[in-house]
Amino acid sequence: MLQHKRWISAALAAVMTLSLTACGGKTETAEVNENGETEWEANADIFNMDQTEEELYELAKQEGKVTFYSISSRCTKIAEAFEAKYPGIECESFDISTNELLEKVTREHEAGQHTADVVHIKDQDGSLWNEYVQNKVFYNYLPTEIAAHIDPVYTETQVPLYIELTQLFYNSEAYPDGAPISNIWEITQPEWKGRIMMQNPLDNVSWGSWITGFCTGDVPDQLAVAYKELTGEELTLSEGCENAGYEFLKRLHDNEPIFTSSSDEIAEAVGTKGQTNPPIGFCASSKLRKNIDNDWCLAPINLYPTTGIPAINTLYVVEGCEHPNAAKLLIRFMLGGTDGDLSGYEPFNTLGGWPVRDDIEPAEGSTPYEELNVSAFDPVAIYDNINVVRDFWTLLG
Amino acid sequence: MRTNAEIQSYSKSKRIKNQILEVVTNPYNVIVLIAIALLTYLIVLPLLDMISTTFVLAQRDARSAGGTTGEFTLYYWHRLLASELTGKLLLQPLLNSLLIGVCVSVLAITLGSVLAWLMVRTDLPFKKFFSLAVIIPYMIPSWCKSQAWLTMFKTERIGGAPGFLTSLGVNVPEWLAYGPVAIILVLSLHYYAYAYLLVSAALNSINSELEEMGEIQGAGKMMILRKITFPLVLPAMLSAVILTFSKAIGTFGVINYLGNPVNFVTLSSQLYMNNKSQNTETAFAMALILICIASISVFMNQKLIGSRKSYATIGGKGGRSTEIRLGMHKPIITIVLILFFIVGIMMPILLLILESFMLREGSYALSNFTLHYWIGDPDPTIMEGLPGIFKNDDFINALLNSIKLTFVTGILGTIFGQILGYICAKGRGKLHGKIVEQLVFIPYLIPSVAFGGIFLSMFSTPQTIFGVTIIPSLYGTFALISLTSVIKHLPFASRAGTSNMLQISGELEEAASIVGAGFFKRFARIVFPLSKGGFISGFMLIFVSIMKELDLIILIMTPKTTTLPYLAFQYANGNSPQASDCVAIVMFSIVFLVYAIANIFGDADLAKSMGG
């Protein structure tokens, strides 16, 4: 019997040793040519922003295929439109949520499986800039001709596709005279206790980034000013609150917002007609689209001084991908191209999403983006502070 | 001349040699060794990967932890176990998790066992119908039940259309609508299936002579139940406890849905929130804590089972089964059951079906009903121009993939599970049995996405040992999806296998062994046929679970190997919940059909093999 046990433990030990060696890290430093480019970078000509669509199409036809991972279900439409415009190139799309997309593409890249050529995602917490672009896993490809039509504020760290927001909504049937509030501090007042709906900020990276946006940059100062304008008093910071942003979050938390597990639930809770005392709620601006489909009466509030940071949809080329030219062509196509044909952008041009290009009109019925109070998105500040703010919120209870 | 010592050492080494020879030539031992090696490779390796992740500093935390990216750190464990965050991040959620785990286990096991006993041992009317219906709750996705719960009990607190009871003017208390009570009830209604399937398989194999003997001795019904029936199904019940408890502390969807409105957080929901906030290290550390808790429950089970002599009910003698008469309680029990089925089973399904026919959500006007989401042609104003599911090629593709995956995984998983169950049962109380039992259980509590991710990394490159390729790269293959699903679901199959194998008396195998039957012959001709009941319950548990599986395989899927749950997710993501419901209904129908077939033929087979 004893021998028996020994056998087993010996076998176990052997297998474990094997597995440990298999785990061992493999760090490879890529070789670079005289321009400081890796082989892939040179072959893909990834830093060349001046190729025309015709040139790219010729090169892409030789590649024959392009695959993109997207956080939007609209990706299948894009793929169809792309194949229609550029026959000879098969376009495959895969719709997957943010977290899984990053996990999948990272692991595939590490394993040398270069399946995805293009990634459509949102850089909400700055990790795409700080971890992917800086570490050369993803590449920003923004053709010069298109860049000319986009405010450089948006293109420093990313290739923006369109902008979404986390907006506060109210029920326009219950408040026919317009938004019941306008100053963001009003939601911390007793009148709205237990009547504000949102997702738990700890739930995911998108909400985490959004609350972090209030605590960084010049937003805290704006919040302090807005507080004084509303109440006539200086804002006093509670213990543990570094600035007006943290104070705002603390007071919002103390006002017992109701959490749900999805943006859809919030839109439904706020927008359903026939309610006597409907709540107000924060949710993705894109939910506005469902107003007609579901006969809701959601209306957005343009909060003063800010409605928070934007969620910018971004596009990347994946390092090592096998179809770089088709990838570049697809990105141009999705960005709206340069020939006036917008079929690659159109599926994204809906209520609650705003184009970044000055030569593309937003969807009918949209509030012009310039009129909205939106804070600037700083990927470094958000990235550095998101876990600090998450921990702050966790400690609130 | 040899000295005494020499003779002694010679005989000792010879003895060792013989013993080794005996160990290696015995097929049972070889199987045990292979099983342990494979499990170590497929389960311990991912676990080590997770453990090491929690000790490596991530780029995003480098600033707050004050180190450099990629270096060894205790930051995550310190933060979790001994910082000011510990209370909110770990202790409170952990207490909530245990509360849910214990309450759900007690309720679900009680409910499942009582139902199993009623279906198998008594003269309950409409048994065929009931035994088909009783398993349905497990087949419906749990979010569907949470949704039904809210439709019923929703209060004004979360706005929107009022709940059914509220609209009738009933003042629903908030503690019932949201939070722990709601979660416990909904989860119990979901997980009683484990106890039901395992206990009814065990009861099926009990020879009612044992109970009759008690009756002859003058024991009352309760006494027989307590002293004879109950001890014999104890292993099955304890297996169910482990499955239920672990699942209840590891689940996330229902807790998120019903707990969020009152800010009720468990360790599993903390885990998922951290995972979705890209704090993988913290999430893994939490998963490891959950694995430890489950491991303790398996250990306690081993102690409990190990201290008893035998549970063998399938002996060399023929058995038969006499139904126990319920007498005057019969009508009452029947009515209670029917009510239970209407409220707990029909409600969520009807709600789902109803919604799939509604052009717009939440509008019950007759003009709002349509077949569009089922068979409609593309219409640019609905569903972003997608056709109804039966006209969509993606649906057909996903349907075929799902069917293939569930059958392949269900059958392979069950066979492995039975073999592992055999090892656990025969090795009861021995080290190798305990090791296998613990190993098999680990995947259960590794979060699905993480497990899928680790397997994706492991098998995307060829696996080599000393330069020899053992497994080629499985990236993008169906084999990888199946492998991942089988390993992740081994706990189901092996639990079903263990409780089953514990009941098969050793005397049967001994008898065969005496007449010269080898190990494989014994397994194929005696053990396997006798374990059909457990085989079928194990198969059903895996089959149903894989049909609903998305998180586990989403990272491994390619656009060509998508399955039905992926399609359901895609529709929901694209603002077409109705089409998503349609897919869910198709999934449910397949599972139900397979269960009905297994139930009808399984019963027939079982009765024949036990008929003696």
Image (cartoon, rainbow, N blue to C red):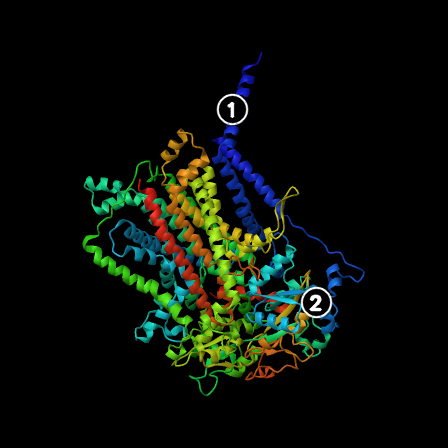
Left or right relative to B450: residue B434: left
Label 2: state its secondary structure. helix
Q: Looking at the image, which residue sits at the far bottom?
A: A177
* Chain where mark 1 sits: B
Instruction: Give A82 or A161, whichever is nearer the viewer.
Output: A82
Query: Does B440 sit above or below residue A195?
Result: above
Residue B478 in which image quadrant: bottom right
Kind of residue at disc 1: Arg
Q: Residues within 10 Å of mark 1 (few under 14, many from 20)?
A: few
Percent across and percent down for residue A37 are 76, 61
Percent across and percent down for residue B264 are 42, 64
Residue drawn 41% across the image and 41% down it: B528
Query: Does B495 sit above or below residue B279?
Result: above
Label 1: state its secondary structure. helix
Percent across and percent down for residue B596 are 37, 56
Percent across and percent down for residue B554 are 54, 60
Q: In the image, which is nearer the foreground, mark 2 or mark 1?
A: 2
Instruction: Check disc 2 and report the residue beneath it.
Output: A61
Q: Answer whether residue B50 is visible to the viewer in this image.
A: yes
Q: Looking at the image, which residue sits at the far top?
A: B1
Find the distance from the CA under tag 2 to the CA under tag 1: 72 Å
Query: Does B292 sit above or below residue A306?
Result: above
